């Protein structure tokens, strides 16, 4: 069974825990296109069977999150799991809607972001959180990210919490974004809630919980590989050409360069990559 399953990841569960459970359900190879923090909830696309071959086309997807930022406290992990290492006042005037929206909007665009020390990015062969747990200092290089949009959802002046929605590029750390927003608001803060509502074209509305997946027929929530490439062009290959194509022979085609869905007698057989008039095999079912 091959395709993609969009899981609605629960809180306090690692992405690897989810992968393990889905492997048991499908008895197939299972991969992912990027993990979610244990505290985070929401969209987690998983690749099933030959769907794992689609990974290279899905790992660079942009993402949309709903975020809760708690102001006045800073933690060592930049989220609610960490120890409070600093506290600061949160004057009422900085929580005025106009001021908060101005600060949020200032983050729109391309920028350099320094990933949090508690992250899985590797430096000199070790993950950053390994350095952090040992109290070791390490130089963290900034990475270029992009915030496409960021919209205020709610301000709670009593609890000093701000809720917002952000659409951002791959590689954006929301924990760091929360700390940076708090700093621009002249205080400190940490990410207290995170819900991912979209990854590329995959949305929360099509996501399924592990519990419901276990009860349903396996194919009910399986997104076919063909749908991943629905915006790509298509090429029909006759039997002789298909045999050559499947054997790795490049087929001459007068079409623009790009990725194409390949069909034989109307049946989807996989994808091919066309470059300089030559079509070569890519993902084969």
Image (cartoon, rainbow, N blue to C red):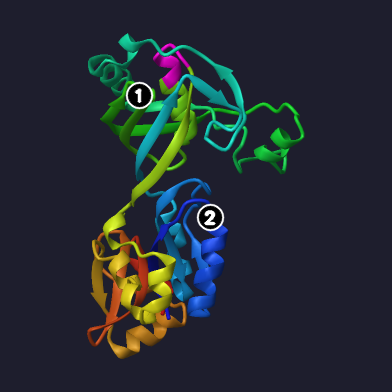
Residue for badge 2: 13
Residue 203 in view of the camera: no
Q: Which residues are magenta?
A: 182-187
Question: Could you say whether the residue bearing mark 2 is in a helix, strand or loop?
Answer: loop
The quarter holding residue 250 reads bottom left
| N-terminal-most mark, 2 or 1 | 2
Question: Could you say whether the residue bearing mark 1 is in a helix, strand or loop?
Answer: loop
Q: Position of residue 153 (x, y in %)?
A: 26, 32
Quarter of the rendering occupied by the N terminus: bottom left
Q: Residue furthest front?
A: 158
Q: Position of residue 116 (x, y in %)?
A: 57, 32
The quarter holding residue 266 reads bottom left
Answer with left or right where residue 146 lies relative to residue 255: right
Residue for badge 1: 107
Number of numbered discs overlaid on the protein picture: 2
Q: Residue at x 41, y 80 (%)?
A: 285
* Looking at the image, residue 67 lies above or below residue 202: above
Q: Position of residue 223 (x, y in %)?
A: 33, 71
Nearer to us: label 2 or label 1: 2
Magenta-colored stretch includes residue 29: no
């Amino acid at each position: 069974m091959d395709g993609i399953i969009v899981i609605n990841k629960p809180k306090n569960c690692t992405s690897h825990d989810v992968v393990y459970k889905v492997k048991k359900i499908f008895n197939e190879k299972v991969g992912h296109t990027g993990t979610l923090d244990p505290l985070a909830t929401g969209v987690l696309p998983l690749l099933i069977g030959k769907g794992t071959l689609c990974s290279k086309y899905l790992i660079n997807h942009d993402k949309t999150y709903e975020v809760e930022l708690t102001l006045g406290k800073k933690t060592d992990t930049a989220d609610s799991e960490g120890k409070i290492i600093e506290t600061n006042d949160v004057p009422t005037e900085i929580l005025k809607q106009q001021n908060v929206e101005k600060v949020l909007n200032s983050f729109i665009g391309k920028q350099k972001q320094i990933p949090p020390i508690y992250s899985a990015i590797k430096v000199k062969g070790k993950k950053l959180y390994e350095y952090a747990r040992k109290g070791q200092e390490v130089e963290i290089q900034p990475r270029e990210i992009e915030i496409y949009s960021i919209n205020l959802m709610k301000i709670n002046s009593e609890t000093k919490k701000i809720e917002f929605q952000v659409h951002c590029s791959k590689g954006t750390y929301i924990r760091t974004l929360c700390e940076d927003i708090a700093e621009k608001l002249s205080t400190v803060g940490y990410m207290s809630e995170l819900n991912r509502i979209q990854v590329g074209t995959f949305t929360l509305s099509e996501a399924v919980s592990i519990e419901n997946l276990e009860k349903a027929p396996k194919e009910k929530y399986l997104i076919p590989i063909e749908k991943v490439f629905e915006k790509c062009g298509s090429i029909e290959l006759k039997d002789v050409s298909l045999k050559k194509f499947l054997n790795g022979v490049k087929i001459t085609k007068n079409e623009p360069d790009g990725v194409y869905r390949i069909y034989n007698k109307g049946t989807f057989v996989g994808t091919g990559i066309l470059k300089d008039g030559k079509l070569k095999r890519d993902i084969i079912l």
